Image (cartoon, helix red, strand yellow):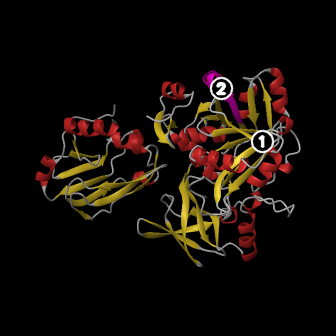
Amino acid sequence: MGRQTPLYDSHVASGAKMVDFAGWDMPIHYGSQLNEHRQVRQAAGMFDVSHMAVVDLAGAATRDFLRHLLANDVAKLQTSGAALYTCMLNPAGGIKDDLIVYRRDDGAYRMVVNAGTRDKDLAWIREWAADFDVAVTERPDLAMIAVQGPAARDAVHGVVSDGLAAGLADLERFHALAGDGLFVARTGYTGEDGYEIIVPGDAAADLWARLAARGVAPTGLGARDTLRLEAGLNLYGSDMDEDTTPLESALGWTVAWEPAERDFIGRQALEAQRAAGPARILVGLVLEGRGVLRGHQKVITDKGEGETTSGSFAPTLERSVALARVPAGTTSAQVEIRGRLHDVIISRPPFVKNGQPNLHI
Amino acid sequence: MSDIPKDLRYSPSHEWVRDEGNGVVTLGITDHAQESLGDLVFVELPEVGQAIAVGDEMGVVESVKAASDLFSPVSGEVVEVNETLGDTPEAINGDPYGDGWIAKVKLSVPAELDELLDADAYTAVAEEEDD
Protein backbone atom coordinates (compact mmCIF):
# COMPACT_ATOMS: atom_id res chain seq x y z
CA MET A 1 0.00 0.00 0.00
CA GLY A 2 1.24 3.49 -0.85
CA ARG A 3 0.79 6.81 0.88
CA GLN A 4 -2.77 8.00 1.20
CA THR A 5 -4.15 11.52 0.96
CA PRO A 6 -6.82 12.78 3.39
CA LEU A 7 -9.33 12.12 0.60
CA TYR A 8 -8.55 8.40 0.26
CA ASP A 9 -11.77 7.29 1.99
CA SER A 10 -13.80 9.73 -0.13
CA HIS A 11 -12.40 8.17 -3.29
CA VAL A 12 -13.11 4.62 -2.21
CA ALA A 13 -16.65 5.59 -1.17
CA SER A 14 -17.18 7.04 -4.66
CA GLY A 15 -16.15 3.78 -6.31
CA ALA A 16 -12.76 4.96 -7.49
CA LYS A 17 -10.32 2.58 -9.13
CA MET A 18 -7.17 3.26 -7.11
CA VAL A 19 -3.70 2.93 -8.60
CA ASP A 20 -0.16 3.61 -7.52
CA PHE A 21 1.06 7.02 -8.60
CA ALA A 22 4.57 8.01 -7.49
CA GLY A 23 4.13 5.96 -4.33
CA TRP A 24 0.62 7.28 -3.58
CA ASP A 25 -2.71 5.44 -3.78
CA MET A 26 -4.62 7.69 -6.15
CA PRO A 27 -7.89 7.45 -8.12
CA ILE A 28 -7.34 6.78 -11.84
CA HIS A 29 -11.08 7.04 -12.54
CA TYR A 30 -14.44 6.62 -10.83
CA GLY A 31 -16.06 4.50 -13.55
CA SER A 32 -15.39 6.23 -16.85
CA GLN A 33 -12.36 8.34 -17.65
CA LEU A 34 -14.09 9.63 -20.79
CA ASN A 35 -17.18 10.81 -18.91
CA GLU A 36 -15.01 12.55 -16.33
CA HIS A 37 -13.00 14.26 -19.07
CA ARG A 38 -16.18 15.52 -20.74
CA GLN A 39 -17.65 16.63 -17.43
CA VAL A 40 -14.64 18.91 -16.89
CA ARG A 41 -14.83 20.34 -20.42
CA GLN A 42 -18.58 20.92 -20.20
CA ALA A 43 -19.30 21.66 -16.52
CA ALA A 44 -16.94 21.07 -13.59
CA GLY A 45 -14.79 18.32 -12.14
CA MET A 46 -12.54 18.07 -9.11
CA PHE A 47 -9.21 16.34 -8.67
CA ASP A 48 -7.40 15.27 -5.55
CA VAL A 49 -3.91 16.62 -6.10
CA SER A 50 -2.84 16.36 -2.47
CA HIS A 51 0.07 14.17 -3.51
CA MET A 52 1.76 17.28 -4.85
CA ALA A 53 4.05 18.98 -2.35
CA VAL A 54 3.43 22.40 -0.88
CA VAL A 55 6.66 24.10 0.19
CA ASP A 56 6.63 27.38 2.13
CA LEU A 57 9.63 29.66 2.10
CA ALA A 58 10.19 32.57 4.43
CA GLY A 59 13.02 34.75 5.63
CA ALA A 60 14.71 37.99 4.63
CA ALA A 61 16.54 36.52 1.64
CA THR A 62 13.69 34.45 0.16
CA ARG A 63 13.16 36.69 -2.86
CA ASP A 64 16.89 36.74 -3.66
CA PHE A 65 17.06 32.98 -3.20
CA LEU A 66 14.15 32.29 -5.56
CA ARG A 67 15.62 34.66 -8.16
CA HIS A 68 18.65 32.36 -8.12
CA LEU A 69 16.80 29.04 -7.86
CA LEU A 70 14.17 29.54 -10.59
CA ALA A 71 14.46 30.26 -14.32
CA ASN A 72 11.49 32.61 -14.27
CA ASP A 73 11.85 35.75 -12.15
CA VAL A 74 9.81 36.16 -8.96
CA ALA A 75 10.54 39.89 -9.17
CA LYS A 76 7.59 39.88 -11.61
CA LEU A 77 5.30 39.07 -8.67
CA GLN A 78 4.36 42.59 -7.65
CA THR A 79 1.54 41.85 -5.24
CA SER A 80 0.65 39.33 -2.58
CA GLY A 81 -1.10 36.36 -4.20
CA ALA A 82 0.48 36.79 -7.63
CA ALA A 83 1.73 33.52 -9.14
CA LEU A 84 4.31 32.41 -11.67
CA TYR A 85 4.84 29.17 -13.62
CA THR A 86 8.51 28.32 -13.82
CA CYS A 87 11.10 25.62 -14.23
CA MET A 88 13.75 24.83 -11.65
CA LEU A 89 16.93 23.92 -13.55
CA ASN A 90 20.16 22.10 -12.91
CA PRO A 91 23.44 23.82 -13.87
CA ALA A 92 23.29 22.17 -17.32
CA GLY A 93 19.92 23.80 -17.96
CA GLY A 94 18.02 20.50 -17.53
CA ILE A 95 14.65 20.69 -15.84
CA LYS A 96 14.66 19.51 -12.20
CA ASP A 97 10.95 20.23 -11.99
CA ASP A 98 8.22 22.56 -13.16
CA LEU A 99 6.27 24.37 -10.48
CA ILE A 100 4.09 27.29 -9.54
CA VAL A 101 5.40 29.84 -7.07
CA TYR A 102 3.09 32.25 -5.25
CA ARG A 103 4.06 35.45 -3.52
CA ARG A 104 2.59 35.77 -0.05
CA ASP A 105 2.64 38.51 2.57
CA ASP A 106 5.81 39.75 4.25
CA GLY A 107 8.21 38.49 1.60
CA ALA A 108 7.16 34.88 2.04
CA TYR A 109 6.53 32.58 -0.92
CA ARG A 110 4.77 29.25 -1.51
CA MET A 111 5.73 26.70 -4.14
CA VAL A 112 3.79 23.66 -5.33
CA VAL A 113 5.98 20.94 -6.82
CA ASN A 114 5.26 17.57 -8.40
CA ALA A 115 4.62 14.42 -6.36
CA GLY A 116 7.18 12.29 -8.16
CA THR A 117 9.93 14.83 -7.64
CA ARG A 118 9.08 15.80 -4.04
CA ASP A 119 12.10 14.31 -2.29
CA LYS A 120 14.63 15.29 -4.93
CA ASP A 121 13.21 18.82 -5.09
CA LEU A 122 13.30 19.35 -1.34
CA ALA A 123 16.88 18.14 -1.11
CA TRP A 124 17.83 20.45 -3.99
CA ILE A 125 16.01 23.46 -2.56
CA ARG A 126 17.52 22.94 0.90
CA GLU A 127 20.99 22.51 -0.56
CA TRP A 128 20.88 25.86 -2.34
CA ALA A 129 18.98 27.59 0.47
CA ALA A 130 21.86 26.90 2.85
CA ASP A 131 23.66 29.93 1.38
CA PHE A 132 20.70 32.21 2.06
CA ASP A 133 18.67 33.34 5.06
CA VAL A 134 15.65 31.23 4.10
CA ALA A 135 13.48 28.79 6.06
CA VAL A 136 12.17 25.96 3.88
CA THR A 137 9.09 24.21 5.27
CA GLU A 138 7.31 21.31 3.64
CA ARG A 139 3.58 21.28 4.40
CA PRO A 140 2.38 17.66 4.56
CA ASP A 141 -0.48 18.90 6.76
CA LEU A 142 -2.12 20.46 3.70
CA ALA A 143 -4.26 18.85 1.01
CA MET A 144 -5.06 20.23 -2.42
CA ILE A 145 -8.20 20.01 -4.55
CA ALA A 146 -8.29 21.30 -8.15
CA VAL A 147 -11.75 22.33 -9.37
CA GLN A 148 -11.80 22.84 -13.12
CA GLY A 149 -14.27 23.53 -15.90
CA PRO A 150 -16.61 26.27 -17.11
CA ALA A 151 -18.84 25.85 -14.02
CA ALA A 152 -15.95 25.46 -11.57
CA ARG A 153 -15.71 28.99 -10.23
CA ASP A 154 -19.43 29.31 -9.50
CA ALA A 155 -19.37 25.97 -7.71
CA VAL A 156 -16.47 27.04 -5.50
CA HIS A 157 -18.08 30.42 -4.79
CA GLY A 158 -21.06 28.47 -3.50
CA VAL A 159 -19.12 26.57 -0.84
CA VAL A 160 -17.06 29.39 0.68
CA SER A 161 -18.05 32.39 2.80
CA ASP A 162 -19.69 35.35 1.07
CA GLY A 163 -16.62 37.44 1.78
CA LEU A 164 -14.22 35.01 0.16
CA ALA A 165 -16.60 34.43 -2.74
CA ALA A 166 -16.70 38.17 -3.43
CA GLY A 167 -12.91 38.30 -3.43
CA LEU A 168 -12.65 35.28 -5.71
CA ALA A 169 -15.13 36.76 -8.17
CA ASP A 170 -12.60 39.53 -8.85
CA LEU A 171 -9.51 37.32 -8.73
CA GLU A 172 -7.40 37.46 -11.87
CA ARG A 173 -5.94 34.36 -13.49
CA PHE A 174 -2.67 33.21 -11.95
CA HIS A 175 -3.47 34.90 -8.66
CA ALA A 176 -4.38 33.43 -5.29
CA LEU A 177 -6.44 34.59 -2.35
CA ALA A 178 -6.40 33.30 1.22
CA GLY A 179 -9.56 33.12 3.34
CA ASP A 180 -11.74 30.70 5.34
CA GLY A 181 -8.54 28.82 6.16
CA LEU A 182 -8.12 28.10 2.44
CA PHE A 183 -5.56 29.23 -0.11
CA VAL A 184 -7.43 29.51 -3.41
CA ALA A 185 -5.47 30.00 -6.64
CA ARG A 186 -6.98 30.65 -10.06
CA THR A 187 -4.67 28.17 -11.71
CA GLY A 188 -5.06 24.68 -13.13
CA TYR A 189 -3.81 21.96 -15.43
CA THR A 190 -6.72 21.29 -17.77
CA GLY A 191 -6.93 24.32 -20.04
CA GLU A 192 -10.17 25.25 -18.30
CA ASP A 193 -10.89 28.05 -15.87
CA GLY A 194 -11.04 27.09 -12.22
CA TYR A 195 -9.19 26.96 -8.96
CA GLU A 196 -6.57 24.96 -7.14
CA ILE A 197 -7.54 25.03 -3.47
CA ILE A 198 -5.04 24.31 -0.73
CA VAL A 199 -6.94 23.18 2.35
CA PRO A 200 -5.93 21.80 5.78
CA GLY A 201 -5.83 18.04 5.46
CA ASP A 202 -8.47 17.50 8.14
CA ALA A 203 -10.93 19.79 6.29
CA ALA A 204 -10.37 18.31 2.83
CA ALA A 205 -13.03 15.58 2.89
CA ASP A 206 -15.70 18.06 4.00
CA LEU A 207 -14.79 20.49 1.21
CA TRP A 208 -14.80 17.60 -1.29
CA ALA A 209 -18.28 16.56 -0.15
CA ARG A 210 -19.64 20.10 -0.35
CA LEU A 211 -18.28 20.51 -3.88
CA ALA A 212 -19.81 17.15 -4.87
CA ALA A 213 -23.16 18.39 -3.52
CA ARG A 214 -22.78 21.34 -5.93
CA GLY A 215 -22.52 18.93 -8.85
CA VAL A 216 -18.73 18.93 -9.20
CA ALA A 217 -17.77 15.47 -10.45
CA PRO A 218 -14.91 13.54 -8.84
CA THR A 219 -12.34 13.20 -11.62
CA GLY A 220 -9.40 10.82 -11.68
CA LEU A 221 -5.81 11.16 -12.75
CA GLY A 222 -6.68 9.44 -16.04
CA ALA A 223 -8.84 12.35 -17.18
CA ARG A 224 -6.35 14.80 -15.71
CA ASP A 225 -3.79 13.43 -18.15
CA THR A 226 -6.01 13.61 -21.26
CA LEU A 227 -7.19 17.10 -20.27
CA ARG A 228 -3.66 18.44 -19.80
CA LEU A 229 -2.53 16.84 -23.06
CA GLU A 230 -5.40 18.44 -24.99
CA ALA A 231 -4.38 21.73 -23.37
CA GLY A 232 -0.80 21.16 -24.59
CA LEU A 233 0.60 21.24 -21.06
CA ASN A 234 3.81 19.35 -20.35
CA LEU A 235 3.94 16.47 -17.90
CA TYR A 236 7.11 16.26 -15.85
CA GLY A 237 9.00 13.02 -16.42
CA SER A 238 7.36 12.48 -19.82
CA ASP A 239 7.62 15.69 -21.83
CA MET A 240 10.53 17.16 -19.89
CA ASP A 241 13.16 15.97 -17.45
CA GLU A 242 16.67 16.65 -16.21
CA ASP A 243 18.11 15.90 -19.66
CA THR A 244 15.97 18.42 -21.50
CA THR A 245 15.96 22.19 -21.22
CA PRO A 246 13.02 24.61 -21.34
CA LEU A 247 14.11 25.55 -24.88
CA GLU A 248 13.77 21.90 -25.93
CA SER A 249 10.43 21.58 -24.12
CA ALA A 250 8.43 24.47 -25.60
CA LEU A 251 8.92 26.36 -22.34
CA GLY A 252 11.27 29.11 -23.52
CA TRP A 253 8.51 31.56 -22.61
CA THR A 254 8.94 30.72 -18.93
CA VAL A 255 12.59 31.79 -18.86
CA ALA A 256 13.16 35.38 -17.75
CA TRP A 257 16.30 36.50 -19.64
CA GLU A 258 16.02 40.06 -18.37
CA PRO A 259 17.59 41.52 -16.30
CA ALA A 260 20.72 40.04 -17.84
CA GLU A 261 22.62 40.23 -14.55
CA ARG A 262 20.24 37.88 -12.72
CA ASP A 263 22.28 34.75 -12.14
CA PHE A 264 19.84 31.81 -12.00
CA ILE A 265 20.94 28.19 -11.88
CA GLY A 266 21.36 26.90 -15.43
CA ARG A 267 21.53 30.34 -17.03
CA GLN A 268 24.95 29.92 -18.60
CA ALA A 269 24.09 26.62 -20.26
CA LEU A 270 20.73 27.90 -21.41
CA GLU A 271 22.24 31.04 -22.94
CA ALA A 272 24.72 28.95 -24.89
CA GLN A 273 21.92 26.75 -26.20
CA ARG A 274 19.82 29.78 -27.04
CA ALA A 275 22.70 31.32 -29.02
CA ALA A 276 23.35 28.12 -30.98
CA GLY A 277 19.65 27.30 -31.33
CA PRO A 278 18.33 24.12 -29.72
CA ALA A 279 18.80 21.01 -31.86
CA ARG A 280 15.52 19.50 -30.64
CA ILE A 281 12.14 21.06 -29.99
CA LEU A 282 8.81 19.89 -28.60
CA VAL A 283 5.87 20.00 -30.99
CA GLY A 284 2.28 18.85 -31.11
CA LEU A 285 1.18 16.01 -33.39
CA VAL A 286 -2.31 15.09 -34.56
CA LEU A 287 -2.88 11.61 -35.99
CA GLU A 288 -4.60 11.84 -39.37
CA GLY A 289 -6.23 8.43 -39.37
CA ARG A 290 -7.52 6.00 -36.81
CA GLY A 291 -5.40 4.69 -33.96
CA VAL A 292 -3.87 6.03 -30.78
CA LEU A 293 -0.55 7.78 -30.31
CA ARG A 294 1.33 6.92 -27.10
CA GLY A 295 4.52 8.09 -25.47
CA HIS A 296 7.90 6.80 -26.70
CA GLN A 297 6.87 6.02 -30.26
CA LYS A 298 9.40 6.68 -32.99
CA VAL A 299 8.80 9.80 -35.09
CA ILE A 300 10.24 9.94 -38.59
CA THR A 301 10.60 13.52 -39.84
CA ASP A 302 12.07 15.37 -42.80
CA LYS A 303 14.94 16.39 -40.51
CA GLY A 304 15.63 13.03 -38.86
CA GLU A 305 14.26 10.94 -36.02
CA GLY A 306 12.33 12.07 -32.99
CA GLU A 307 10.15 10.53 -30.31
CA THR A 308 6.69 11.09 -28.90
CA THR A 309 6.92 12.13 -25.26
CA SER A 310 3.25 11.61 -24.43
CA GLY A 311 0.23 10.74 -26.49
CA SER A 312 -3.35 9.67 -26.07
CA PHE A 313 -6.80 9.65 -27.51
CA ALA A 314 -8.14 13.19 -27.10
CA PRO A 315 -11.80 12.86 -26.09
CA THR A 316 -12.77 16.42 -27.06
CA LEU A 317 -11.34 15.93 -30.57
CA GLU A 318 -12.25 12.25 -30.89
CA ARG A 319 -8.86 11.65 -32.45
CA SER A 320 -5.37 11.08 -31.16
CA VAL A 321 -2.76 13.71 -30.33
CA ALA A 322 0.76 13.67 -28.95
CA LEU A 323 3.63 15.83 -27.88
CA ALA A 324 6.89 14.87 -29.54
CA ARG A 325 10.52 15.92 -29.37
CA VAL A 326 11.79 16.30 -32.92
CA PRO A 327 14.76 17.91 -34.70
CA ALA A 328 14.48 21.71 -34.93
CA GLY A 329 13.08 22.78 -38.28
CA THR A 330 10.91 19.71 -38.74
CA THR A 331 8.06 20.40 -41.14
CA SER A 332 6.58 16.94 -41.73
CA ALA A 333 6.41 13.75 -39.69
CA GLN A 334 5.12 10.21 -39.43
CA VAL A 335 4.80 8.12 -36.28
CA GLU A 336 5.59 4.43 -36.06
CA ILE A 337 2.80 2.54 -34.31
CA ARG A 338 3.42 -1.20 -33.93
CA GLY A 339 5.79 -1.30 -36.87
CA ARG A 340 3.70 0.77 -39.28
CA LEU A 341 4.15 4.43 -40.18
CA HIS A 342 1.14 6.68 -39.71
CA ASP A 343 0.75 10.21 -41.06
CA VAL A 344 0.53 13.00 -38.50
CA ILE A 345 0.03 16.73 -38.73
CA ILE A 346 2.31 19.04 -36.78
CA SER A 347 0.01 21.34 -34.86
CA ARG A 348 0.96 23.96 -32.30
CA PRO A 349 -0.64 23.16 -28.92
CA PRO A 350 -3.06 23.69 -27.27
CA PHE A 351 -5.13 21.16 -29.21
CA VAL A 352 -8.22 22.28 -27.29
CA LYS A 353 -8.83 25.86 -26.18
CA ASN A 354 -11.76 27.04 -24.07
CA GLY A 355 -13.28 23.59 -24.49
CA GLN A 356 -13.21 23.81 -28.30
CA PRO A 357 -10.95 22.11 -30.87
CA ASN A 358 -7.96 24.31 -31.73
CA LEU A 359 -6.20 22.34 -34.45
CA HIS A 360 -4.05 24.16 -36.96
CA ILE A 361 -4.66 21.80 -39.84
CA MET B 1 -17.03 -8.89 -9.91
CA SER B 2 -16.93 -9.23 -13.66
CA ASP B 3 -19.57 -11.09 -15.64
CA ILE B 4 -18.18 -14.51 -16.72
CA PRO B 5 -20.93 -16.47 -18.54
CA LYS B 6 -20.96 -20.21 -17.90
CA ASP B 7 -21.63 -21.17 -21.54
CA LEU B 8 -18.43 -19.67 -22.98
CA ARG B 9 -14.81 -20.80 -23.09
CA TYR B 10 -11.89 -18.51 -22.26
CA SER B 11 -8.19 -17.95 -22.90
CA PRO B 12 -5.82 -16.89 -20.11
CA SER B 13 -5.20 -13.73 -22.19
CA HIS B 14 -8.85 -12.70 -21.64
CA GLU B 15 -10.52 -13.63 -24.91
CA TRP B 16 -13.86 -15.42 -24.84
CA VAL B 17 -15.08 -18.00 -27.38
CA ARG B 18 -18.66 -19.00 -28.16
CA ASP B 19 -19.15 -22.27 -30.07
CA GLU B 20 -21.84 -21.56 -32.65
CA GLY B 21 -22.18 -25.33 -33.33
CA ASN B 22 -21.41 -25.25 -37.04
CA GLY B 23 -17.63 -25.31 -36.92
CA VAL B 24 -17.58 -21.55 -36.37
CA VAL B 25 -16.84 -19.68 -33.15
CA THR B 26 -17.48 -16.07 -32.19
CA LEU B 27 -14.85 -14.38 -30.08
CA GLY B 28 -14.23 -11.17 -28.20
CA ILE B 29 -12.61 -9.87 -25.02
CA THR B 30 -14.04 -10.58 -21.59
CA ASP B 31 -15.89 -8.26 -19.26
CA HIS B 32 -12.90 -8.46 -16.93
CA ALA B 33 -10.60 -7.35 -19.76
CA GLN B 34 -12.75 -4.40 -20.81
CA GLU B 35 -13.04 -3.31 -17.18
CA SER B 36 -9.28 -3.43 -16.74
CA LEU B 37 -8.65 -1.50 -19.94
CA GLY B 38 -11.23 1.21 -19.30
CA ASP B 39 -12.98 3.24 -22.00
CA LEU B 40 -12.14 1.72 -25.38
CA VAL B 41 -11.50 4.19 -28.19
CA PHE B 42 -10.03 2.15 -31.04
CA VAL B 43 -10.13 -1.43 -32.28
CA GLU B 44 -7.86 -2.84 -34.97
CA LEU B 45 -9.78 -5.80 -36.36
CA PRO B 46 -8.36 -8.89 -38.07
CA GLU B 47 -9.01 -9.25 -41.78
CA VAL B 48 -11.66 -11.51 -43.20
CA GLY B 49 -9.93 -14.46 -44.86
CA GLN B 50 -6.94 -14.20 -42.54
CA ALA B 51 -5.56 -17.54 -41.35
CA ILE B 52 -4.75 -17.60 -37.67
CA ALA B 53 -3.27 -20.03 -35.17
CA VAL B 54 -3.59 -20.18 -31.40
CA GLY B 55 -1.63 -17.34 -29.82
CA ASP B 56 -1.33 -15.25 -32.98
CA GLU B 57 -1.82 -11.53 -32.71
CA MET B 58 -5.06 -10.89 -34.52
CA GLY B 59 -5.82 -7.30 -33.60
CA VAL B 60 -5.48 -4.58 -31.02
CA VAL B 61 -7.91 -2.97 -28.62
CA GLU B 62 -6.93 0.45 -27.37
CA SER B 63 -8.40 2.25 -24.42
CA VAL B 64 -7.72 5.86 -23.49
CA LYS B 65 -4.83 4.73 -21.36
CA ALA B 66 -3.36 1.63 -23.00
CA ALA B 67 -3.14 -0.62 -26.03
CA SER B 68 -3.69 -4.35 -25.63
CA ASP B 69 -3.01 -7.02 -28.21
CA LEU B 70 -5.79 -9.41 -29.13
CA PHE B 71 -4.50 -12.98 -29.32
CA SER B 72 -6.28 -15.71 -31.18
CA PRO B 73 -7.64 -18.36 -28.80
CA VAL B 74 -8.20 -20.83 -31.69
CA SER B 75 -6.83 -21.79 -35.10
CA GLY B 76 -8.74 -21.28 -38.31
CA GLU B 77 -9.87 -18.66 -40.78
CA VAL B 78 -11.50 -15.34 -39.94
CA VAL B 79 -14.86 -15.43 -41.73
CA GLU B 80 -16.47 -12.27 -40.35
CA VAL B 81 -15.46 -9.24 -38.27
CA ASN B 82 -17.58 -6.77 -36.32
CA GLU B 83 -17.17 -3.71 -38.56
CA THR B 84 -19.42 -1.60 -36.32
CA LEU B 85 -16.59 -1.43 -33.78
CA GLY B 86 -14.81 1.01 -36.12
CA ASP B 87 -17.31 3.69 -35.15
CA THR B 88 -18.40 2.35 -31.78
CA PRO B 89 -15.48 0.68 -29.99
CA GLU B 90 -17.29 1.48 -26.74
CA ALA B 91 -19.72 -1.34 -27.58
CA ILE B 92 -17.09 -3.62 -26.07
CA ASN B 93 -17.37 -1.74 -22.77
CA GLY B 94 -21.14 -1.83 -22.82
CA ASP B 95 -21.77 -5.37 -24.08
CA PRO B 96 -18.55 -7.40 -24.37
CA TYR B 97 -20.36 -10.71 -25.04
CA GLY B 98 -23.00 -9.26 -27.36
CA ASP B 99 -22.68 -6.15 -29.54
CA GLY B 100 -19.00 -5.98 -28.61
CA TRP B 101 -18.07 -9.28 -30.32
CA ILE B 102 -14.93 -8.96 -32.44
CA ALA B 103 -14.65 -11.79 -34.98
CA LYS B 104 -16.03 -15.11 -36.15
CA VAL B 105 -13.55 -17.86 -36.96
CA LYS B 106 -14.06 -21.11 -38.88
CA LEU B 107 -12.15 -23.67 -36.86
CA SER B 108 -9.41 -25.76 -38.41
CA VAL B 109 -8.72 -27.68 -35.19
CA PRO B 110 -12.06 -28.01 -33.36
CA ALA B 111 -10.43 -30.00 -30.56
CA GLU B 112 -8.65 -26.82 -29.46
CA LEU B 113 -11.91 -25.70 -27.88
CA ASP B 114 -11.42 -28.34 -25.20
CA GLU B 115 -8.06 -26.81 -24.31
CA LEU B 116 -9.63 -23.48 -23.40
CA LEU B 117 -10.64 -22.54 -19.87
CA ASP B 118 -14.15 -23.01 -18.61
CA ALA B 119 -15.88 -20.25 -16.65
CA ASP B 120 -14.66 -21.50 -13.26
CA ALA B 121 -11.05 -21.75 -14.37
CA TYR B 122 -11.17 -18.33 -16.00
CA THR B 123 -12.75 -16.85 -12.88
CA ALA B 124 -9.71 -18.02 -10.95
CA VAL B 125 -7.41 -16.31 -13.49
CA ALA B 126 -9.35 -13.05 -13.28
CA GLU B 127 -9.47 -13.10 -9.48
CA GLU B 128 -5.76 -13.71 -9.25
CA GLU B 129 -5.13 -10.60 -11.37
CA ASP B 130 -7.39 -8.51 -9.16
CA ASP B 131 -5.41 -9.41 -6.04
Q: Residue B71 in the image: x percent, y percent?
A: 29, 55
Amino acid under label 1?
Tyr
- Magenta residue span: A196-208
Percent from the top left, x then y, of residue A284? Answer: 63, 62
Q: Residue furthest left?
A: B111
**Residue type, mark 2 in image:** Leu
Q: Earlier in the sequence, mark 2 or mark 1?
A: 1
- Residue B71 to residue B18: above or below: below
**Considering the image in quadrants, where does the C terminus of chain A appear?**
bottom right
Q: Residue furthest bottom?
A: A303
The mark lying in front, picked from 2 and 1, is 1
Q: Position of residue A143 (x, y in %)?
A: 63, 31
Q: Secondary structure at mark 2?
A: helix
Answer whether residue A72 is magenta in the image: no
Residue under the point 30% across and 60% down: B57
Instruction: Please identify the quarter of the rendering in which residue A165 is found.
Output: top right
The residue tagged 2 is: A211
Residue of label 1: A102
Crowd tier of the residue under label 2, counting other residues whose Cα lies within 10 Å: few below 14, some 14–19, many 20 or above: many
Chain to which mark 1 belongs: A
